[in-house]
Amino acid sequence: MRENILVLDFGGQYNQLIARRVRELNCYCEVHPYNMPVEEIKAMAPSGIIFTGGPSNVLDEDSPKCDMELFELGIPVLGICYGAQLMNYMLGGKVASAPTREYGRTEVQVNNNSVLFEGVNETTVCWMSHTVYIAEAAPGFEVTAKTDVCPVAGAQNTGRGLYCVQFHPEVVHTVEGTKILSNFVRKVCKCKCTWKMDSFVETSIKDIREKVGSGRVLCALSGGVDSSVAAVLLSKAVGKQLTCVFVDHGLLRKNEGDEVEAVFGPNGPYELNFIRVNAQERFLGKLAGVTEPETKRKIIGEEFIRVFEEEAKKIGAVDFLVQGTIYPDVIESGLGKSAVIKSHHNVGGLPDYVDFKEIIEPLRLLFKDEVRKAGLELGIPENLVFRQPFPGPGLAIRIVGEITAEKVRIVQDADAIFRQEMALAGFDKYANQYFAALSNMRSVGCMGDERTYDYACILRAVTTTDFMTAEAAELPWSLISRVTSRIVNEVKGINRVMYDCTGKPPATVELE
């Protein structure tokens, strides 16, 4: 069985980064809810376990607790923040409200004789985020780190393989955080760290073959990066047992439906059973009068599934539905105790009843950049692997308010201009995602000698690696000015253009 680290999620804001940091060490890692049954954990046979942070107070009666048996499995455990408090609280230490709240960059004094802090400076800068602290370490634990405010910023019980830190080693603000995590993975858990993306691809193909057997598979192909990688992965796993259905819901970018068919259709480079369903009127009809973003997502998610079910019946008995869900989709839709930010159409947007034996999501635990690496391993051309991300609900979440055919036309034309100018200026490689969206705000304008009362267009461009956090791209004014001039002059229905300067958080990458 391959070496792996299991992250148990207690609902903190940085949880998704832990898996990412461990994978960057070339060790496979999965995130599961904190209450994952012990028997399932035993079957997984992890090399180590990490408890994440979380928003709860460990002293509260209803705060999430793990099974005591986890500490008796002989598997090394690292508790982070809430996870550190929980470990000490459950094992007999004292946890209390901190006299002074610690938040942000904090100097921590560490004992670098501890294996966890081997090679770390005796005074190092870490990221703290807590109002409760460990006042006394649990019996058998040795204190290995402290601050001026926090008497137990790190502790260990080497005999039982238990380690904890009050700070967050996974965030970039903890200067030597990668070294600390590396010490846990490599020195405590004894992982050789030989996992790479080709290992993921090879293992996934094997696992999919075993799961599917002789069954038939329907893949929801949007033409975006995630679904394209999922489709090619399934094609290599099950060959002609796979049928890819591309639903053109009328909410794609300009000319995108034809572009997707050119790549994946019968004249494209892939041997896929490809079906295109033109359902523009069907989706627009369902969305008529709907303005609430979550409702839009759920309508589109359900209608997608219904179309797939109908196509499956035409094909014959289909056992499995494949989706290109990736890890940020799962996080934002609420993993474990994490807050629901928005229902991704592949996750929270699915209807309660789905007429398939099982849904296969082979990319569910990958970040966007990892999906791209998997795509390259599968031999997908770079121009497809690095194409602009596009959400499954499409322009429905780039149009604020009610969706109409006219609004779709407006935002398609504006977006095409923005993408064209970004490429001409050489900024298409700098920004990881960029698009034009349509606000629901109308304002008075003057074009020629005539009064206008039209919509405001919003340009959005961000830089990011994993799409869990993002910063607004610093585009030159000359580029924004040129795009603005073209959109106002060439797109009927827009008389004002704005640029979104908000990062993620507090915003999301998409507009709605």
Image (cartoon, rainbow, N blue to C red):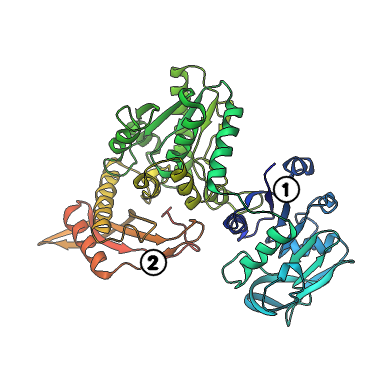
Instruction: Pinpoint residue 12: horizontal percent, then vertical percent.
Output: 64, 59
Residue 48 to residue 153: above or below: above
User: For the residue carrying disc 1, how many other residues have a C-alpha within 10 Å: few (<14), some (14-19), or many (20+)?
Assistant: many
Residue 23 to residue 234: above or below: below
Residue 19 visible, this orientation:
yes
Instruction: Pinpoint residue 382: horizontal percent, then vertical percent.
Output: 37, 47
Q: Is residue 403 left or right of residue 505?
A: left
Q: Which mark is residue 46?
A: 1
Instruction: Pinpoint residue 460: horizontal percent, then vertical percent.
Output: 36, 59
Q: Which mark is residue 231?
A: none
The amino acid type found where label 1 is placed reads: Pro
Residue 427 to residue 113: above or below: above
Instruction: Pinpoint residue 499: horizontal percent, then vertical percent.
Output: 33, 64
Query: For this rendering, which residue is in front, 111 or 401?
Result: 111
Query: For this rendering, which residue is in front, 353 or 16?
Result: 16
Residue at 59%, 23% in the rendered image? 213
Q: Which residue is mark 2?
A: 501
Q: Is residue 189 left or right of residue 317?
A: right
The amino acid type found where label 2 is placed reads: Cys
Which of the two labelled residues, at mark 2 and mark 1, occupies the earlier sequence position?
1
Furthest residue in direction bottom, as rendered: 148
Distance in Å between CA atoms under marks 2 and 1 = 42 Å
Residue 364 visible, this orientation:
no
Query: For this rendering, which residue is in front, 488 or 164?
Result: 164
Q: Quadrant of the N terminus?
A: top right
User: For the residue carrying disc 2, how many other residues have a C-alpha within 10 Å: few (<14), some (14-19), or many (20+)?
Assistant: some
Query: For this rendering, which residue is in front, 271 or 217?
Result: 271
Circle 2 or circle 1, nearest the eye = 1
